[in-house]
Image (cartoon, rainbow, N blue to C red):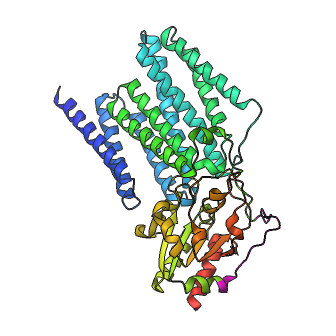
């Protein structure tokens, strides 16, 4: 091994260590920024060493692509709002999968023309293009649902599952022919096309309530596609990085499913939920049930003179971009001597960690954020719970109503607090499409309106106390 090869091998080892450390730091909001930086440095090292390792003759197009990609990344980070982060994550998942599929397709086209392709290489190339292409179109559909370009409700049609099964069977049969008998570019192209269609078919029947699971699963798929591509191009660091992303995404997917008390197969094939409700809609899901409501002054009196307040953020906070107003409210209450905590449900919002990201962007201290298991024992001793745009994750029907589709899902036990104030535009159902029993609890009071406006009004009234 010459000196350059030694340097490259050591650099790859350093990059692998940094990837692992970065992933470790990403497990906590307090260290996530450091983890992201370490992972970015690792990727830069990996790219530079790969360019040296492959002895590139002409860097012109590579340099142009890197400049364009850097500019897109910088402008995206600066211009995309934090409320649109789930869409951006979905888009990046798709681009990662698409890149893997393109590399695999080009490599297969090249290898099949210059020499007989070994079976193991053909299999890994097929896996790379299949997972990558499926991830690309599936992520584009997820992006469309999150962005509101496609209905957030499940999209189903007759014989949908048999059609999907038939396409999967066709992929298996064609892959066996390509890998074992005839490395045909035409058949390989058909596999790629079917994978692209399957990506769409598998995501359109998934409702908005399950978007956190979809995002984490597609993230895992993008990593697995990259890992398979690493075998195709014989790049160790790509294998390591892809395997880390794939494994982390699968673990996170399992955590999301557990948080909803549902299996992954039920999430993928259950056509669960109704998607978004129209903003500002006033239809009442509760029929003849009555609710109590409060105005600004009453809400300010209850919250401002409490000894302990637990804030429960949900997608309504994200949609209204109310995180900065919420931070101002928490700071005001703390100055008044109120103990303030934030209760974070694992599947609140549109992607894993959505609430953590928004609150961190608003500079809410990490030590005020508590996971569901840690905060639930606190609710019976809490004076006021302030719910800001959350719905299904606080619905007591998950505990008591065996006929409810969310029965068995672990929820935040906000109904055990002394007082509950719920900021919501209307009594409309949430993503799961079921009525929320908490709205009609004698201890609950509805504070109707947009999350940002109501929190700002609440801050203004508390300052008068």
Q: Is residue 285 magenta?
A: yes
Picture quarter with the C terminus: bottom right
Which x, y percent locates residue 108?
A: 47, 19
Q: Main secondary structure of the magenta part?
A: loop
Residue 397 forms part of the magenta stretch: no
User: Which residue is more in the foreground, 163 or 433?
Assistant: 433
Residue 89 appears in the figure: no
Q: Residue at x 43, y 28 (%)?
A: 228
Q: Position of residue 250 (x, y in %)?
A: 47, 41
Q: Nearer the viewer, residue 332 or 422?
A: 422
Relative placement, left or right, of 235 versus 403 is left
Image-based side of 219 in relation to 1, left or right: right
Residue 353, given in percent of the width and then of the height, sits at 50, 56
On screen, residue 209 above or below 124: below
**What residue sits 50% from the left and 22% below the top?**
126
Q: Which residues are magenta?
A: 281-298
Q: How many numbered marks have been drawn onto this rendered protein structure?
A: 0
- Quarter placement of the N terminus: top left
Work out whether residue 402 can be spotted. Answer: yes
Q: What residue appears at the point 50 percent right and 83 percent down from the top-left corner?
A: 307
Residue 181 higher or lower than 454, as above or below: above
Q: Image quadrant of residue 278?
A: bottom right
Quadrant assignment, res 122: top left
348 left or right, relative to 113: right
Between 355 and 9, the one lying in front of the other is 355
Extreme residue in the right direction: 288
């Amino acid at each position: 091994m010459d000196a350059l090869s030694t340097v490259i091998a050591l650099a790859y080892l350093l990059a692998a260590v940094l990837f692992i450390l970065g992933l470790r730091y990403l497990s906590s909001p307090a260290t996530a920024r450091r983890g992201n930086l370490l992972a970015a440095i690792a990727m830069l090292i990996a790219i530079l060493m790969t360019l040296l390792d492959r002895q590139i003759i002409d860097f012109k197009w590579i340099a142009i692509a890197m400049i364009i990609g850097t500019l897109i990344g910088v402008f995206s980070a600066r211009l995309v709002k934090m409320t649109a982060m789930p869409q951006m994550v979905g888009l990046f998942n798709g681009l990662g999968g698409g890149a893997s599929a393109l590399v695999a397709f080009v490599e297969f086209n090249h290898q099949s023309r210059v020499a007989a392709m070994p079976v193991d290489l053909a299999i890994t190339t097929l896996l790379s293009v299949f997972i990558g292409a499926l991830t690309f179109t599936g992520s584009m559909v997820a992006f469309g649902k999150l962005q509101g370009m496609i209905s957030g409700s499940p999209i189903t049609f007759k014989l949908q599952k048999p059609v999907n099964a038939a396409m999967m069977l066709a992929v298996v049969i064609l892959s066996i022919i390509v890998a074992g008998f005839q490395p045909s570019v035409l058949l390989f192209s058909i596999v790629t096309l079917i994978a692209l269609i399957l990506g769409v078919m598998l995501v359109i029947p998934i409702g908005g309530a399950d978007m956190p699971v979809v995002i984490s699963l597609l993230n895992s798929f993008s990593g697995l596609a990259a890992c398979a591509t690493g075998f195709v191009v014989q790049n160790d660091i790509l294998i390591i990085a892809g395997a880390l992303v794939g494994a982390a995404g699968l673990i996170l997917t399992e955590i999301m499913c557990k948080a909803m008390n549902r299996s992954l197969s039920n999430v993928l094939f259950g056509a669960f939920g109704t998607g978004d409700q129209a903003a500002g809609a006033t239809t009442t899901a509760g029929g003849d049930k009555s609710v109590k409501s409060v105005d600004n002054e009453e809400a300010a009196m209850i919250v401002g003179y409490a000894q302990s307040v637990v804030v429960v953020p949900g997608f309504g906070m994200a949609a209204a971009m109310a995180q900065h107003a919420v931070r101002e409210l928490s700071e005001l209450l703390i100055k008044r001597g109120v103990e303030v905590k934030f209760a974070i449900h694992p599947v609140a919002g549109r992607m894993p960690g959505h609430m953590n990201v928004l609150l961190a962007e608003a500079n809410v201290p990490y030590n005020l954020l508590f996971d569901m298991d840690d905060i639930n024992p606190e609710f019976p001793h809490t004076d006021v719970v302030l719910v800001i745009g959350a719905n299904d994750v606080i619905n007591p029907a998950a505990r008591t109503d065996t006929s409810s589709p969310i029965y068995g899902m672990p929820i935040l036990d906000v109904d055990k607090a002394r007082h509950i104030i719920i900021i919501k535009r209307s009594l409309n159902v949430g993503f799961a499409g079921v009525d929320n029993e908490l709205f009609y609890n004698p201890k609950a009071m509805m504070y109707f309106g947009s999350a940002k406006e109501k929190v700002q009004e609440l801050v203004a009234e508390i300052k008068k106390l």
